[in-house]
Every structure is written in structure tokens, then in C-alpha cells.
Image (cartoon, rainbow, N blue to C red):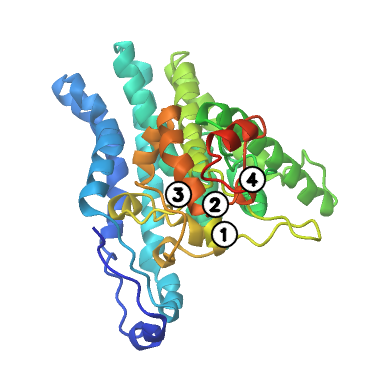
């Protein structure tokens, strides 16, 4: 089911002046949905019913894929001439700003709940994963704000990223991933035949090391030492250290495993997104040794309406990489893009079961590149096996 269609290019000027975002108030879902994270522990405290501790996980990992299936895709694009007015409307910035205290409240409420209540390990794990997933929303918010030029946006991005101890993300993503995306050199672009559990061991440390190298180079160009107080990674780490030390001092050593598990799962949500966003796609190396410019065809796209409303349209990832400065409300769909069969939450679940992921995505990847193996980013150790397995579908 498709909710709407692209506006023909010749009609964009005609409709721009009268254009009204049909999802303008639906974007508020992105602010309301994360409230489900502290809602479960809150309702448990009121009722004593442990089933409430699973409400967030059930909603996001089962409910959202179901809603995506029911409500289908939305391929509507704003007319290009209306984009400046969309970008300048403070309403959309206000939505992102409003989410910051919600993420912070949910994080502190849940980690304090975990450190101060004696729960069965399974219920403890459910709330820890819930809280880590909330940090995933914080990383997504930091991603949206971190691409902006306003200092307030950058400051809020730094704060939300510091909640999960992932302050290097904006540097790694903006200056590293966007430059090397869909190439073998990018630790945040997964390769065909690589499962998510091996990907995490290259993506997490690879992102941190690349961010440090990039920040060290930036500071060196200014005549500063890498350990300068101007180092953005160290600034965010200091903020994380202050918050985490305060939590441990106030609530004791039970807070330590809480912060470790919650922080890891928050980072793993970013890893999950990176894994599915560029799986197997490859930019071509040109005669001069440089890679071709990143195009929309180098990212997997999803137009599923409901999940896009929850994640600030991150799933229109193709346009994001083609135009990183565009705000969520202005991102577009394009014809003939690499397309995921579900929204991110549904695809996360699929990725957590590698045989199922490979069964769904490997043939889809081959079809997307027209069977041309030169356009596939193979995992080096799996290349020959995959070429043999899919010999009938691939051309060398």
C-alpha cells in the first residue's frame, strides 16, 4: 500500500507556494513514542505487574513492523522549491529540541530503577535493553542535530550522545562515514556475507579510532595537541564521566553493570542501523584512484510510513547521504533506489538472525546491482564462496 506518489517535477513550482506538509503534526509521534521506555517501569511501580516491563520492546520490535505492514509506504516528496521554507520553520526544530529532555528523563529514570530494584534477571534485561534502545533514539537525535550548523543544535547533540558515552559519533559520522560510505575502507558500511555479530567488532572500534584520528588531525591543523581541552571527544567523555560518576556515587555499585549493559545496547542500535543501511553496496573506484561521488543508489532506503515518523525519516537514507544537511522533513524518495522490505525495526530483527538476513538480502542486493559483481562490496573472506553460490545470478 502506497500512501501517495511523487509530485511530477514540472509541477513543483506550481504547488510550492501552497504546499503544506501532510505529516506536519504526525511528526510529533517521534516525541511521544520514546516515552514508552520509562512508561513500562512506571506502570510496574504502580501495579507490580512485570508484564509492563516489556511494553517498549513489544511496541517497537513487534508493533512497529506490524504498523509498517498495515500502513505501507509513503513516497510523497515536498516540491523542491518548498524546501527552503520547510528548512526554516522553527516548528520542526522545536520537535527535535523537545525530544532532548524526554530522552534524558527516560534514561535517568530507567537506570535508577534498575539499580534500586531487585528484579528477576529476565525482567532486568528487558528494562536494560529498553533503556539502551532509548539511547538509540538519542543517537538518532544526535545524528539529526549533529548535521546542523547552529551551535545550539551541536550542543544538544553532544549532550544526547554523552548519555550513552558515544560522544565521538558526530565526528566519525560527519567527517568519516560520509566520506568513505559504501567503500571497503568504511568500518560503518557492512559487506555482503558479513553478519551483524562480526560487523560489530569492526564497526564499534573502527568508528572510535577513526573519530580520534580525525579529531587529532583537526587539532593539529590548529596547532593544538590531541589532548587539548578543545578536543570534542574528550569534552563529551568528560560530560559522560561526570554523569556516570554521579549516578554510581548516588546509587552504588549496582549502577555499574546497568550503565555498561545499557550503554552497549545503545551503541548496538547504531551498529544495527549502520549494518542495514549500506549492506553490500559499493561505490566504484575511478581511474584517478578516487571513489565516485556518493549517490542515492549507495544506500538502502525505506519509505515505510510509521517507522519513518518515529526515527525522523532516517530511513530515507539515500537522500540523507546525497544531501547530508537536509532536515528530516525535507528528505525525498527517488525512483529505483535500493529498497528494504520493511522499516528499520523489522530489519533489525531480521539482521539478528543472520541466515534469515542473508536469505532475504543477498538476492535483493544482487537484483539491485543488476547482477554486476563489480558493484558489490564483498566480505573478502566470503567473496569466492558467494560468487560460487550465486553464480547464476552474478556476472563478473
Residue indicated by mark 1: 151
| Among numbered discs 4 and 3, the one appearing first in the sequence | 3
Answer yes or no: do the residues labelled 2 and 1 have beta carbons within 8 Å?
Answer: yes
How far apart are the two marked residues, 4 and 3, measured between alpha carbons? Answer: 16 Å
For label 1, count other residues whose C-alpha is less than 10 Å away and answer few (under 14), some (14-19) or many (20+).
Answer: few
| Among numbered discs 4 and 2, the one appearing first in the sequence | 2
Question: Which secondary structure, mark 3?
Answer: helix
Residue indicated by mark 4: 172
> Where residue 88 sits: x, y (%)?
44, 73
Question: Residue at image x 66%, y 48%?
Answer: 183
The quadrant of the image that shows the N terminus is bottom left
Residue indicated by mark 3: 141
- The foreground one among 362 and 150 is 362
Question: Residue at image x 29%, y 55%?
Answer: 305
Q: Nearer the viewer, mark 1 or mark 4?
A: 4
| Among numbered discs 3 and 1, the one appearing first in the sequence | 3
Answer yes or no: do the residues labelled 4 and 2 have beta carbons within 8 Å?
Answer: no
- The foreground one among 313 and 348 is 348
- The foreground one among 360 and 196 is 360
| Among numbered discs 1 and 4, the one appearing first in the sequence | 1
How far apart are the two marked residues, 3 and 2, measured between alpha carbons? Answer: 12 Å
How far apart are the two marked residues, 3 and 1, measured between alpha carbons? Answer: 15 Å
Amino acid at each position: 500500500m502506497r500512501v501517495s506518489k511523487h509530485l511530477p517535477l514540472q509541477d513543483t513550482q506550481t504547488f510550492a507556494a501552497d504546499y503544506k506538509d501532510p505529516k506536519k503534526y504526525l511528526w510529533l509521534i517521534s516525541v511521544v513514542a520514546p516515552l514508552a521506555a520509562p512508561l513500562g517501569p512506571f506502570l510496574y511501580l504502580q501495579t507490580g505487574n512485570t508484564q509492563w516491563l516489556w511494553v517498549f520492546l513489544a511496541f517497537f520490535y513487534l508493533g512497529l513492523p506490524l504498523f509498517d505492514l498495515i500502513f505501507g509506504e509513503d513516497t510523497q516528496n515536498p516540491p523542491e522549491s518548498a524546501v527552503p521554507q520547510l528548512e526554516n520553520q522553527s516548528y520542526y526544530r522545536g520537535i527535535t529540541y523537545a525530544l532532548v529532555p524526554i530522552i534524558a528523563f527516560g534514561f535517568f529514570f530507567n537506570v535508577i530503577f534498575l539499580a534500586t530494584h531487585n528484579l528477576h534477571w529476565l525482567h532486568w534485561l528487558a528494562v536494560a535493553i529498553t533503556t539502551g534502545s532509548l539511547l538509540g533514539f538519542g543517537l538518532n537525535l544526535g545524528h539529526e542535530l549533529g548535521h546542523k550548523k547552529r551551535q545550539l543544535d551541536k550542543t544538544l547533540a553532544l549532550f544526547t550522545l554523552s548519555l550513552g558515552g558515544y560522544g565521538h559519533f558526530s565526528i566519525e559520522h560527519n567527517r568519516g562515514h560520509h566520506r568513505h560510505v559504501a567503500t571497503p575502507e568504511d568500518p560503518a558500511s557492512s559487506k555482503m556475507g558479513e553478519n551483524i555479530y562480526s560487523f560489530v567488532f569492526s564497526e564499534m572500534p573502527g568508528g572510535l579510532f577513526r573519530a580520534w584520528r580525525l579529531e587529532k588531525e583537526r587539532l593539529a591543523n590548529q596547532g593544538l595537541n590531541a589532548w587539548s581541552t578543545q578536543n570534542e571527544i574528550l569534552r563529551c567523555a568528560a560530560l559522560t564521566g561526570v554523569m556516570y560518576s554521579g549516578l554510581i556515587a548516588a546509587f552504588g555499585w549496582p549502577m555499574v553493570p546497568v550503565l555498561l549493559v545499557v550503554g552497549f545496547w545503545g551503541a548496538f542500535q547504531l551498529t544495527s542501523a549502520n549494518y542495514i543501511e549500506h549492506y553490500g553496496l559499493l561505490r566504484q573506484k575511478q581511474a584517478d584512484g578516487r571513489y565516485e561521488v556518493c549517490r542515492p543508489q549507495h544506500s538502502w532506503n525505506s519509505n515505510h510510513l510509521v517507522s519513518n515518523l518515529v526515527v525522523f525519516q532516517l530511513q530515507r537514507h539515500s537522500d540523507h547521504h546525497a544531501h547530508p544537511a537536509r532536515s528530516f522533513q525535507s528528505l525525498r524518495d527517488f525512483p529505483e533506489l535500493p529498497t528494504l522490505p520493511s522499516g528499520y525495526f523489522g530489519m533489525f530483527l531480521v539482521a539478528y538472525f543472520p541466515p534469515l538476513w542473508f536469505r532475504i538480502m543477498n538476492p535483493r542486493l544482487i537484483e539491485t546491482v543488476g547482477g554486476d559483481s563489480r558493484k558489490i562490496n564483498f566480505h573478502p573472506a566470503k567473496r569466492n564462496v558467494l560468487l560460487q553460490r550465486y553464480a547464476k545470478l552474478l556476472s563478473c
